[in-house]
């Protein structure tokens, strides 16, 4: 198979949670452990940092990778989902995994994947870890796909565990309370491995303290970290919490004899997009009219994004909005401003919520607009309707942003 055929097979052969939802979810790590054994345990051949959380884990992972790159370390980065290219998920020093490596890896192991009915995510984790071993990375920043305890990435024993925050997302898998979700995220905490908590609440803090104590893992809370001397090229005030999490983590890593200077930290934070290729975080796509997209997609993430939106200056506000069908729609729609024109659409994935349903539900929250047959047609109409001093915002789902990008 060539690269294009390989990617088609990866996406279509077996369910993938990000696209199809619950049918792709596996409630144990047995298949991943089996795959790791088959690959001769690549996860044990490189140092790593493990990052979980409801929101911010992608930004934190990219910021850390950028700092390590500036410090001269060969830095692997595993994240999900991708926006434009599958290979965004697996990078070394900001460079995507080569197409030929993806094709050859799948070709070599395809019969094992099929006979063991591995999921998309399990295959991708195996590919990433195999690539990091092959390329002899100094450190790999590994972002959890969903949850933590049962996530395929949770076969690593990292230098440090990071949990950015806890919110009620993926409740059908992770639980219906903050405490239940915290238990799942805290599943990445390993014996004697330090853990940084980016943001704790009265509900989640005792959970983290209890599980860390059981594992004899030192626990650190980032809330008191001072960020006034640091800035990042990731825009949006909501990034300040991610910045605190990164700085707290770097302090611990410096004490573990990683050679990271103050200059490395400041430069890495300022050059995150250039160093890692991160997209979709308060990304300005154009001006006149100003067009901004953001991948925030759950209640907690969208609340922060829409608070940032209020700080923008514009004539009229145009919002291109689409969501997936496993969200608590009421809790999301109530966050959006009524003083805007909406361009409703359905992201082109099986999980995408039917646009007619989104349109009718949104009307109940005073959100006025029209429905469109595709994300691209909604976006094109929004830009066409906007005057040069207006603002167009694109969001609601990672997949909506991906289609525009």
Image (cartoon, rainbow, N blue to C red):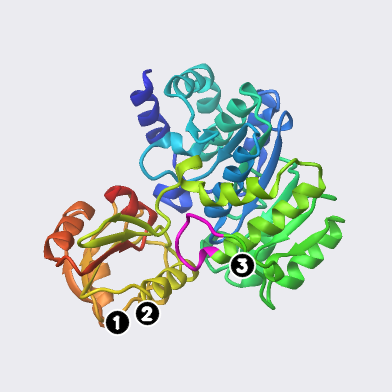
Magenta region includes residue 350: no
Q: Tell me if I can see residue 253 in this picture.
A: yes
Say which quarter of the image contains residue 235.
bottom left
Pointer 2 residue: 334
Q: Secondary structure at mark 2?
A: loop
> Disc 1 and disc 3: Cα gap in Å?
38 Å
Q: Nearer the viewer, residue 367 or 109?
A: 367
Say which quarter of the image contains residue 240.
bottom right
Q: Are marks 1 and 3 in contact (CB under 8 Å)?
A: no
Q: Secondary structure at mark 3?
A: loop
Pointer 1 residue: 365
Q: Are marks 1 and 2 in contact (CB under 8 Å)?
A: yes
Say which label, 2 or 3, has the lower sequence index. Answer: 3
> Percent from the top left, x then y, of residue 73?
65, 34
> Percent from the top left, x then y, of residue 331?
42, 76
Q: Is residue 34 above or below residue 293?
A: above
Q: Secondary structure at mark 1?
A: loop
* Quadrant of the frame with the N terminus: top left
What secondary structure characterizes most of the magenta part?
loop
Say which mark, if any, is on residue 228.
3
Read off the magenta span: 231-239
């Amino acid at each position: 198979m060539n690269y294009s055929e390989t990617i088609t097979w990866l996406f279509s052969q077996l369910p993938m949670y990000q696209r199809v939802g619950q049918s792709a979810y596996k409630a144990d790590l047995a298949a991943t452990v089996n795959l790791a054994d088959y690959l001769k345990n690549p996860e044990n051949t490189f140092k790593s940092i493990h990052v979980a959380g409801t929101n911010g884990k992608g930004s934190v992972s990219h910021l850390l990778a950028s700092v390590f790159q500036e410090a001269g370390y060969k830095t692997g980065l595993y994240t999900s989902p991708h926006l434009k290219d599958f290979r965004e998920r697996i990078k070394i020093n900001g460079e995507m995994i080569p197409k030929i490596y993806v094709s050859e890896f799948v070709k070599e192991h395809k019969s094992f994947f099929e006979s063991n009915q591995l999921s998309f995510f399990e295959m991708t984790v195996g590919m990433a870890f195999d690539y990091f071993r092959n390329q002899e990375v100094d450190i790999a920043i590994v972002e959890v796909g969903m949850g933590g305890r049962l996530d395929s990435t949770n076969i690593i024993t990292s230098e440090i565990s990071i949990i950015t925050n806890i919110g009620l997302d993926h409740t059908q898998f992770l639980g219906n309370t903050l405490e239940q979700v915290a238990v799942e995220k805290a599943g990445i905490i390993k014996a004697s491995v330090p853990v940084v908590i980016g943001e704790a609440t009265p509900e989640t803090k005792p959970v983290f303290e209890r599980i860390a104590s059981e594992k004899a893992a030192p626990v650190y809370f980032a809330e008191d970290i001072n960020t006034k001397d640091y800035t990042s090229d990731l825009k949006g005030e909501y990034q300040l919490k991610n910045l605190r999490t990164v700085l707290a983590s770097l302090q611990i890593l410096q004490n573990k004899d990683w050679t990271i200077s103050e200059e490395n930290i400041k430069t890495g934070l300022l050059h995150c997009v250039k160093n890692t290729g991160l997209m979709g975080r308060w990304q300005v796509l154009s001006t006149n009219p100003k067009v901004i997209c953001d991948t925030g997609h759950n209640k907690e993430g969208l609340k922060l994004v829409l608070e940032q939106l209020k700080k923008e200056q514009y004539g009229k506000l145009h919002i291109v909005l689409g969501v997936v069908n496993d969200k608590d729609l009421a809790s999301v729609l109530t966050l959006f401003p009524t003083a805007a024109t909406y361009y409703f659409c359905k992201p082109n994935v099986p999980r995408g919520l039917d646009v007619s349903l989104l349109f009718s539900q949104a009307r109940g929250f005073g959100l006025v607009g029209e429905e469109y047959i595709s994300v691209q047609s909604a976006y094109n109409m929004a830009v066409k309707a906007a005057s040069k001093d207006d603002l167009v915002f694109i969001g609601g789902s990672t997949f909506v942003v991906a289609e525009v990008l």
